[in-house]
C-alpha cells in the first residue's frame, strides 16, 4: 500500500469519526431537548396544580366566609324577630297588669274575689291556723269576708273552721304609683301562710297573672305569631 492509499484511508476514517461524532452530538442534543421539554412540562404542570390548589383553597375560604356571614345574619334576624315577639308579649302582660288595677275599684265584685282567693288558699294550705296578709287598703274588705271564707273552707274540706290571723304589722305593698314606678307594688289579693311560715300561698292578683301568663304563653304565641316558640 502506497502513501496515497494510506492517506485516502486515513481521510475516510477521519470522515467516519466526524460523522459518528456529529450523529452522537445530534442524539445528545435531541435527547437533552426532550428531557428539557419534559422537565419544563412537569414544572408547568406542577405550577398549574399549585395554582389550582391555591384557587380551590381560597374558593373554599370564600364559601366558608359566605356561610358564616349568612349564618350570622340569619341569627341576627332571628334574634330581632324573637325580641320583637317578646316586646309584643310583654306589652300584653303590661296591659293586663294595668287592667288588674281596676279590679279592686269595684268593691262588691272585689270583695267576693277576696273571699274566693282566701278559700282557695286555705284549701291549698290545709292548716288549722294561718296568717293572712293583705294590702292596708283592703283590710276592711278582708275582715268583712273572713268568717264566711273560713266557714266555706270548713264545709268544703269537712273540717272545723280554721283560725285566720290577719297580720296588721306587715301589709302587702300598695297599688303601683305613677311617682314611684320602681317600688314594690301589689294590685290586690292575699298571701296566706302557715303559722311557722314554712308553707306560703301567694294568691295576689299579680301572682295569679304571672301563673296564668306562664301557662298560657305557648297559646298566646301561637295565636299571635302562628307558632309555639321553642
Image (spheres, helix red, strand yellow):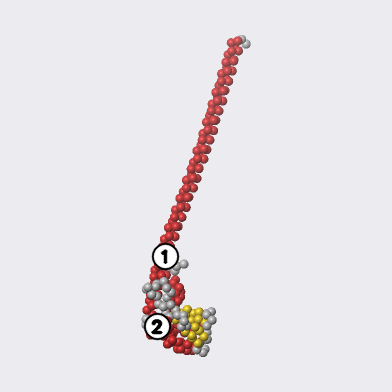
The residue labelled by disc 1 is 83
- CA–CA distance in space, label 2 to label 1: 36 Å
- Residue at the limit of the structure toward the right, as seen here: 1
Residue 15 horizontal side relative to residue 104, left or right: right
Q: Earlier in the sequence, mark 2 or mark 1?
A: 1
Residue 170 appears in the picture as rendered: yes
Q: Is residue 105 above or below residue 151?
A: above
Residue at image location 42% in from the left, 87% down from the top: 144
Q: Is residue 154 above or below residue 101?
A: below
Give how far across and how far down residue 115 sits, in percent.
44, 85
Question: What is the crowding at mark 1: few (fewer than 14 residues within 10 Å), some, or many (at least 20)?
Answer: few
Q: Residue 166: which disc? A: none
Residue at image location 46% in from the left, 55% down from the top: 68
Give how far across and how far down residue 24 sits, in percent.
56, 25
Q: Quadrant of residue 182?
A: bottom left
Residue at image location 58% in from the left, 20% down from the top: 17
The residue labelled by disc 2 is 110
Question: What is the crowding at mark 2: few (fewer than 14 residues within 10 Å), some, or many (at least 20)?
Answer: some
Residue 3 horizontal side relative to residue 135, left or right: right
Residue 216 appears in the picture as rendered: no
- Dot 2 falls on a residue whose secondary structure is helix
Amino acid at each position: 500500500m502506497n502513501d496515497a492509499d494510506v492517506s485516502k484511508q486515513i481521510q475516510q476514517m477521519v470522515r467516519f469519526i466526524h460523522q459518528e461524532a456529529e450523529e452522537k452530538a445530534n442524539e445528545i442534543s435531541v435527547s437533552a431537548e426532550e428531557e428539557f421539554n419534559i422537565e419544563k412540562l412537569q414544572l408547568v404542570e406542577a405550577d398549574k396544580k399549585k395554582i389550582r390548589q391555591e384557587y380551590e383553597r381560597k374558593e373554599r375560604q370564600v364559601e366558608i366566609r359566605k356561610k358564616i356571614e349568612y349564618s350570622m345574619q340569619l341569627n341576627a334576624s332571628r334574634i330581632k324577630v324573637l325580641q320583637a315577639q317578646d316586646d309584643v308579649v310583654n306589652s300584653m302582660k303590661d296591659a293586663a297588669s294595668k287592667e288588674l288595677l281596676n279590679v279592686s275599684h269595684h268593691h262588691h265584685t272585689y270583695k267576693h274575689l277576696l273571699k274566693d282567693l282566701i278559700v282557695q288558699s286555705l284549701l291549698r294550705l290545709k292548716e288549722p291556723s294561718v296568717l293572712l296578709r293583705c294590702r292596708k287598703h283592703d283590710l276592711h274588705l278582708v275582715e268583712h269576708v273572713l268568717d264566711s271564707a273560713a266557714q266555706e273552707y270548713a264545709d268544703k274540706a269537712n273540717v272545723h273552721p280554721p283560725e285566720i290571723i290577719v297580720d296588721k304589722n306587715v301589709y302587702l305593698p300598695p297599688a303601683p304609683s305613677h311617682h314611684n314606678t320602681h317600688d314594690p307594688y301589689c294590685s290586690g289579693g292575699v298571701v296566706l301562710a302557715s303559722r311557722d311560715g314554712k308553707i306560703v300561698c301567694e294568691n295576689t292578683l299579680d301572682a295569679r297573672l304571672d301563673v296564668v301568663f306562664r301557662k298560657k304563653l305557648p297559646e298566646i304565641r301561637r295565636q299571635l305569631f302562628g307558632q309555639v316558640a321553642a
